[in-house]
Amino acid sequence: MKIIVGGADLSNAVMKVSKAISVRTTNEILEGIKLSVKGDNLTLIATDMEIAIEKTVMCDTYVEGDALIPGKIFTEFSKKLENEDQVEIETEENGRIKITYGSSEVEFAALPVDEFPVVKKDLRDKTFSILQKDLKEIVGRTVFCCSTNESRPILKGCLFEVTGDILTAVGIDGVRLAMAKKKIKSASGDFKVIIPARALGEITRLLEKDEEEITFVSENNSLMLEVDGTVFITRLLEGNYMNYKQLIPTEFVTTVRVGRTSLLNSLERALVVAKENNNLVKLDIKENCITVFANTESGNVNESVTVNFEGKDMSIAFNSKFLCDALKAVGDEFVNMYFINNISPLIIKPYSGEEYLYLILPMKINSQV
Amino acid sequence: MKIIVGGADLSNAVMKVSKAISVRTTNEILEGIKLSVKGDNLTLIATDMEIAIEKTVMCDTYVEGDALIPGKIFTEFSKKLENEDQVEIETEENGRIKITYGSSEVEFAALPVDEFPVVKKDLRDKTFSILQKDLKEIVGRTVFCCSTNESRPILKGCLFEVTGDILTAVGIDGVRLAMAKKKIKSASGDFKVIIPARALGEITRLLEKDEEEITFVSENNSLMLEVDGTVFITRLLEGNYMNYKQLIPTEFVTTVRVGRTSLLNSLERALVVAKENNNLVKLDIKENCITVFANTESGNVNESVTVNFEGKDMSIAFNSKFLCDALKAVGDEFVNMYFINNISPLIIKPYSGEEYLYLILPMKINSQV
């Protein structure tokens, strides 16, 4: 291959695909970025066998062909080419890749391009489309509740389920559950996949145009989407997801409506002290007031938050980080909290509607508090 | 003591003094922040015995007195009080410190305040004043060349020497030397101290008003300065600084004038490859051109930079990070580089004037390049 490409185009494309370079691998092939030239197009692709990212840019082509270049050093180097108008990339007979810019040049050792895995991307089968800003929001509200633990790999993914014109996303880590819903723009029919949390993180980083739609396409165990000429492909997690609906209680003893930021501020202050005791904070819930307690060797916190209250008084303890995570993920001024007793899950929902739901299991109340 | 103070004032003051809390110590006293209340003033001070930072804010005083509070947790906690109008701080009979805000409160265990060291700060003796922006610039141009090595502790500091109305700052780490000069606003006379590099870093972080003056006051082995009500005190390094003037050659064989950013860009690209070989890059200097070479297993770089040239051709090798550091620290469009031979130091100076000077020792040219 031999091409000339703009330094800014190259640097931008390399930066995007580099997110899929494998970092912890014994297979140097997966540390490479594959360059493929056909017609006026330079296509870059990287994959770690879980996700793949591909980006195509325009180029002036002298010779078509492919090459596989060590990804980490190429990424670092091409960042420093973004001000070059013209960058020439050429494969040499000695098996090296020569990059020329201005009156300077660099040569990198090439990797065997034929060993680079084929990434299947002509998916069809099932699709749905959603506004980018809605996707960002639904991911932001759920993905942090996905498990990071290898013991139940299926929970390292986020359930994405389309029924009618509603997308429901669910993340569960064994102690808490997040569910969020958004209206989609269109769908080929019902849709149900489990997307690795890491892939969702990388996908949202690609979203730059809030008001534009993005289309999910899935076939068998793969999912593909395209954002501004960047193609993103991820493996899906296979297996049966938890029947999450049966985890969510529907009858409650105590209901509290609370200002989200005032409770969040109190919990965060309590967390400063609670950190050294597994983040344990105790909530005393009574008429008009939640009292937040934390008590450790460093100090003790006693915060009062005014609330609307209905039902029975209650004392219950939580990992306050989990409460903070949930309260940070939503933007509402007020949220509703539903309690049963001090060993049953707490449910957090919007004041009205069903746009999100958090379930958090309580901690055993420590005699110290 | 018992006072009421604004949450934003408290949080800002704690944040400033917390930079002097000792982090690696077996003496918990030095992990504390001392609060002293006298009249309408709350004074906070922290010290690690090398530097001390003190900040005074206005408060409503009910009872004067002192307290020593664990610094790390108090810093973290007071960050979360910045939106509180009124924060009450009170020492209790049980030896704890109670902080009340809104209808909430926290208690921290107090440390024995009598054991907190006395920080001497009524210094006089020698002084000089300089514009804040000039101080920032002179520190930015020299401090990165100070040694980080314990073997010659005196080189962990930066020489500050005032003669007439010129401040000269010098940093040396054994392989390179930086010298910078600035006009000062006033001085009590000649002035010569060696300031720990770390203290200079903290001092520049306090500077927020470019056009205002800042006054250095030194007495014996201490230096004090005050920025916007924050008092900064540091120990000075004692001993004889290197006679740096005799290290700087004055006669050269080859002089090159080069565009600073184009050489910097080339060196940074070469560094991507050179990293795995101690940052070694070779410069071939000839009429009109410096060629920058790096050659390692990852690849090889060959960059050409156009220059004005006078003298003999030369091949010389450097740790390219040191060249990049120097070129990044100055803002000029062009710099002059002076060479003698490939085992003698390179000197970098401005095109005209003496505002800065860098000396960098070459590396042995590796047969590989």
Image (tube, coloured by chain):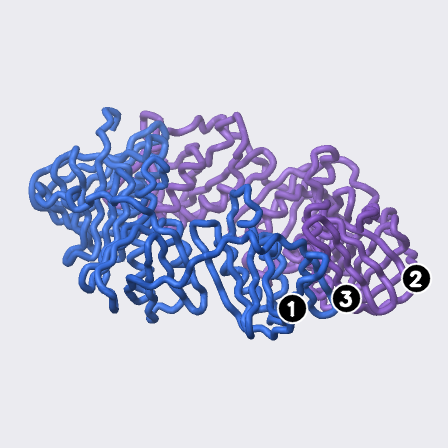
Chain colours: A blue, B purple
In this view of the protein, can residue A320 be seen by the observer? yes
Amino acid on which the number 2 mark rests in the picture: Lys
| Mark 3 belongs to chain | B
Above or below residue B115? Residue A362 is below
Q: Is residue A170 above or below residue A36?
A: above
Q: Residue furthest front?
A: A114
Can you tell which quarter of the image residue A270 is in?
top left
Q: Is residue B331 left or right of residue A273?
A: right
Q: Position of residue A174 (x, y in %)?
A: 27, 38
Q: Nearer the viewer, residue B18 or A210?
A: A210
SS under mark 3: strand
Q: Which mark is residue B305?
A: 3
Q: Crowding at label 3, few (<14), some or many (≥20) Cα neighbours within 10 Å? A: many
Whether residue B98 is visible to the viewer of this picture, yes or no, is no
Do the residues at discs 1 and 3 belong to one chain?
no
In which quadrant will I find the C terminus of chain A?
Answer: top left
Q: Residues within 10 Å of mark 2 (few under 14, many from 20)?
A: some
Element type where label 1 sits in the image? strand
Label 1: few (<14), some (14–19) or many (≥20) C-alpha neighbours in 10 Å = many
Q: Secondary structure at mark 2?
A: loop
**Position of residue B44 measured from the top left corner of the image (x, y, whole percent):** 46, 41
Quadrant of residue A314 within the rendered picture: top left
Tell me if label 2 and label 3 are in contact, CB under 8 Å. no
Q: Nearer the viewer, mark 2 or mark 1?
A: 1
Q: Which residue is mark 2?
A: B312
Task: Give the spatial CA distance, label 2 vs label 3.
Answer: 17 Å
> What percent of the width, then of the height, locates residue A85?
63, 73
Percent from the top left, x then y, of residue B218? 67, 43
**CA distance for labels 1 and 3:** 25 Å
In the rendering, which numbered label is found on residue A2? 1
Kindly identify which chain the residue marked by label 1 belongs to.
A
